[in-house]
């Protein structure tokens, strides 16, 4: 409209890759409504936080941010809280931070355009909190992807697993899958736009259940969907995260063995090496069943790199239980782990469990875990010495004069290029590994 200054927004994202990708869709939706994204809170008319509540520390971040910028309300700026803290705390956020006028969980993003209209009309308390039982996914043609070479596609939203410690089933609502033909259409569109790497996302991608789809297309299993996306013309790499051990079938390993564009990396969170603790966590698998899945991967024709998540200090975790987690690290020899101290979360069954582990002890166990894994990675990465791997060029570390690459196994391989050669960002080049550290490899581009 003539004379009207353009509507602007600032968005900061916390949390997992699902949140990062949700933000790309939210940004696209806002732009389609005439908003322009700006990079500072000061420039913005609408300030949004896409939040995470997986652990207490993550949750506190949003309240610190809101407190930091409260004074800007006097300038007419509006504030919104999106994502997992929004869904978890709901209207209580209006009490704790009265300058907030939008509280919206991820299951309600489909309704954002209507919510924006209400905010613009001056409504002080707009909510999107009632869609956790929805069967619909957030599908939009307006996704604003930030990286031009690799991008996410959500294939399944929500979670029905209800692990005893976890907020996700409460914050993201019930599990629902996107039709495979819609996923494939998005993958083809990305390939046409020049993307070469696709990462399929979901809290449990391997619980994927293809809904009806178009009548001419047969429903696909997760492994079939993976294969179909990996076979899209011009796509060079397909990744997927996260897999749940309970639903992890041999067909996924078979797909990785037979389709070279499927990356040979699987993130399979174990959480604990003790069957007793796994039972208390309601993970519904034993240490032995988990190790059986690892054995399938170790026997694969292509070497598959394996990473995991581990929680230490779950209520009642004894020293003997913790030792079992340590021995699992030795047995599996992971290529990487994410270790966390157990954090009691609202609404979850574990909140009521007795025998809490003191924070100091959790910290000690985490440090022991990480030190052990560091040694394993230092040793394991040595096997790459002298190997030539294809890397996607992701950036340059100017200070070191090194290029940053990533292998199919999801390892960072920093490398030098020969004199006069400038690798193009997003291209794939062969690199020989000449050095290794626990968390990265070093190499030289081969021409
Ligand atoms: N859907 C995935 C993981 C989602 S959350 C899965 O089932 O594996 C990512 C990781 O955060 C989890 O794997 C777990 O290790 C960790 N996590 C979740 N809730 C936690 C809690 N209350 N305290 C500490 N870590 C937690
Ligand atoms: Fe949380 Fe368990 Fe669902 Fe993963 S599977 S998101 S840990 S409830
Ligand atoms: Fe956090 Fe929600 Fe993801 S709690 S880890 S942003 S699903």
Image (cartoon, rainbow, N blue to C red):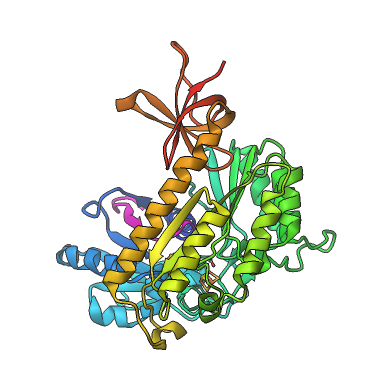
Q: Quadrant of ligand 3?
A: bottom left
Q: Position of residue 332 (x, y in %)?
A: 57, 55
Q: Is residue 276 visible?
A: yes
Q: In screen coordinates, is 26 left or right of 254?
A: left
Say which residue appears at 51% left-offset and 61% top-offset: 327
Q: In screen coordinates, is 357 left or right of 187?
A: left
Q: 334 or 260, which is in the foreground?
A: 334
Instruction: Residue at the far right: name it.
Output: 216
Per the image, is 432 magenta?
no
Note whether 183 is above or below 120 in the view shown: above
Q: Is residue 115 visible?
A: no
Per the image, is 7 magenta?
yes
Note whether 31 is above or below 89 in the view shown: above
Q: Position of residue 271 (x, y in %)?
A: 50, 67
Q: Position of residue 381 (x, y in %)?
A: 50, 39
Q: In screen coordinates, is 247 left or right of 395?
A: right
Say which residue appears at 58% left-offset and 77% top-offset: 134
The C terminus appears in which quarter of the rendering?
top right
Note whether 420 is above or below 199 in the view shown: above
Region rendered in magenta: 1-18
């Amino acid at each position: 409209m003539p004379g009207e200054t353009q509507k602007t927004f600032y968005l900061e994202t916390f949390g997992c890759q699902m949140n990062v990708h949700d933000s790309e869709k939210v940004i696209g939706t806002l732009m389609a409504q005439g908003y322009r994204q700006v990079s500072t809170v000061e420039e913005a008319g609408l300030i949004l936080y896409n939040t995470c509540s997986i652990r207490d520390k993550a949750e506190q971040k949003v309240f610190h941010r809101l407190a930091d910028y409260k004074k800007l309300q006097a300038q007419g700026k509006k504030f919104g809280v999106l994502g997992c803290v929004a869904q978890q705390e709901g209207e209580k956020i209006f009490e704790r931070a009265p300058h907030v006028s939008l509280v919206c969980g991820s299951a309600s993003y489909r309704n954002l355009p209507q919510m924006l209209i209400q905010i613009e009309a001056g409504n002080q308390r707009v909510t999107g909190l009632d869609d956790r039982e929805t069967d619909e996914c957030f599908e939009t043609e307006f996704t604003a992807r930030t990286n031009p070479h690799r991008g996410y596609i959500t294939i399944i939203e929500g979670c029905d697993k209800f692990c005893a410690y976890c907020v996700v089933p409460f914050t993201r609502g019930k599990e629902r899958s996107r039709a495979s033909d819609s996923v494939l259409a998005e993958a083809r569109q990305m390939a046409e736009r020049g993307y070469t790497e696709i990462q399929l996302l979901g809290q449990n991608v391997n619980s994927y259940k293809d809904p009806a789809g178009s009548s001419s297309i047969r429903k696909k299993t997760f492994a079939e969907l993976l294969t179909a996306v990996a076979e899209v013309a011009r796509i060079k790499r397909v990744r997927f995260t996260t897999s749940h051990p309970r639903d992890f079938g041999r067909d996924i390993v078979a797909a990785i063995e037979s389709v070279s564009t499927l990356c040979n990396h699987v993130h399979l969170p174990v959480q604990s090496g003790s069957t007793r603790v796994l039972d208390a966590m309601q993970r519904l698998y034993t240490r032995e069943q988990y190790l059986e899945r690892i054995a399938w991967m170790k026997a694969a024709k292509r070497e598959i790199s394996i990473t995991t998540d581990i929680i230490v200090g779950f209520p009642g975790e004894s020293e003997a239980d913790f030792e079992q987690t340590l021995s699992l690290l030795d047995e599996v020899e992971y290529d990487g782990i994410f270790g966390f101290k157990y954090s009691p979360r609202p609404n979850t069954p574990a909140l009521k469990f007795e025998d809490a582990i003191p924070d100091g002890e959790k910290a000690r166990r985490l440090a022991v875990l990480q030190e052990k894994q560091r040694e394993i990675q230092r040793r394991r990465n040595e096997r790459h010495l002298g190997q030539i791997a294809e890397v996607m060029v992701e950036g340059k570390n100017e200070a070191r004069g090194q290029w940053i690459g990533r292998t199919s196994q999801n390892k960072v391989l920093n490398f030098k290029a020969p004199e006069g050669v400038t690798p193009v960002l997003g291209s794939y080049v062969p690199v020989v590994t000449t050095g290794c550290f626990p968390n990265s490899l070093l190499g030289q581009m081969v021409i």
